[in-house]
Amino acid sequence: DGGITQSPKYLFRKEGQNVTLSCEQNLNHDAMYWYRQDPGQGLRLIYYSQIVNDFQKGDIAEGYSVSREKKESFPLTVTSAQKNPTAFYLCASTGTGPQPQHFGDGTRLSIL
Amino acid sequence: AQKVTQAQTEISVVEKEDVTLDCVYETRDTTYYLFWYKQPPSGELVFLIRRNSFDEQNEISGRYSWNFQKSTSSFNFTITASQVVDSAVYFCALTKPNTGFQKLVFGTGTRLLVSP
């Protein structure tokens, strides 16, 4: 089945540590997105990528970095500069035009 | 700027009751798209419906129906005869057309609790 796979499901970060969240899709979608979800808030866009080797900052990119070396993959690194990383992170992808975004199951990140 | 408001933070109903989730949006664009997504406890967002700004027809899909009114900038979602499986957080979202990229603006969500 086509879809988006996020891993791990749960992740713990120590102070000063960078952690990387994985997102893989087999939907042949060009655009991929990373969102952050905090309790009681909607999803906020961190980064997005329209094509391979290109990505743009979203609304809350500070403390995060991404890469897009392959069409299928869009990993997100939460750096030590992100002082409040505890949140639920969702990856999404979409094809051309105003199609609905397909979402992964998310990764819940907590601080140890 | 675009904005989506879901004023209802949480709604509790008993099974078989009808429930309406409100969504009010703001945009200066004449062409735009509206979406509803469901987020069950497992966490993933499940797409429910997309509506473009030129299509004000209401839509019904099984127990779900949507009422789009441009005059009041609202896109409300009604569940008829609610079931326990409908318990989830529901998000309304807005975007303007753009080839290759779609920046969704989400509301804060409405948590629906359906008890047996």
Image (tube, rainbow, N blue to C red):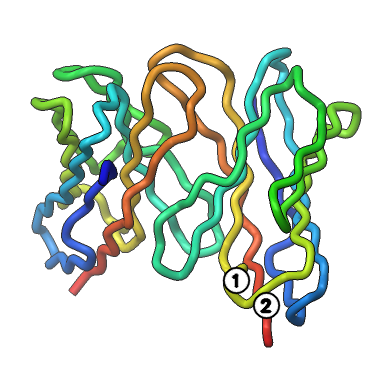
What residue is shown at x 31% (from left), y 56% (from top)? A106
Q: Which residue is mark 2?
A: B114
Which residue occupies 16% across, 26% down? A71
Q: Residue furthest right?
A: B71
Q: In the figure, A79 relative to A40: above or below? A: above
Residue A54: image quadrant is top left
- The residue labelled by disc 1 is B87
Q: Looking at the figure, which quarter contains the C terminus of chain A? A: bottom left
Circles 1 and 2 on the same subunit: yes
A45 and A93: which one is in front? A93
**Towards the viewer: A105 or A20:** A105
Amino acid at the residue labelled 1: Ser
x then y, percent, for residue A55 = 25, 22
**Image marks 1 and 2: residues in contact by CB distance under 8 Å:** yes
What amino acid type should be assigned to the residue bearing mark 2?
A: Val
Image coordinates of residue B91 in percent, x first then y, are 59, 50
* Circle 2 SS class: strand
Q: Residue at x 38, y 16 (%)?
A: B100
Q: Residue at x 24, y 27 (%)?
A: A28
Q: Chain of mark 2?
A: B
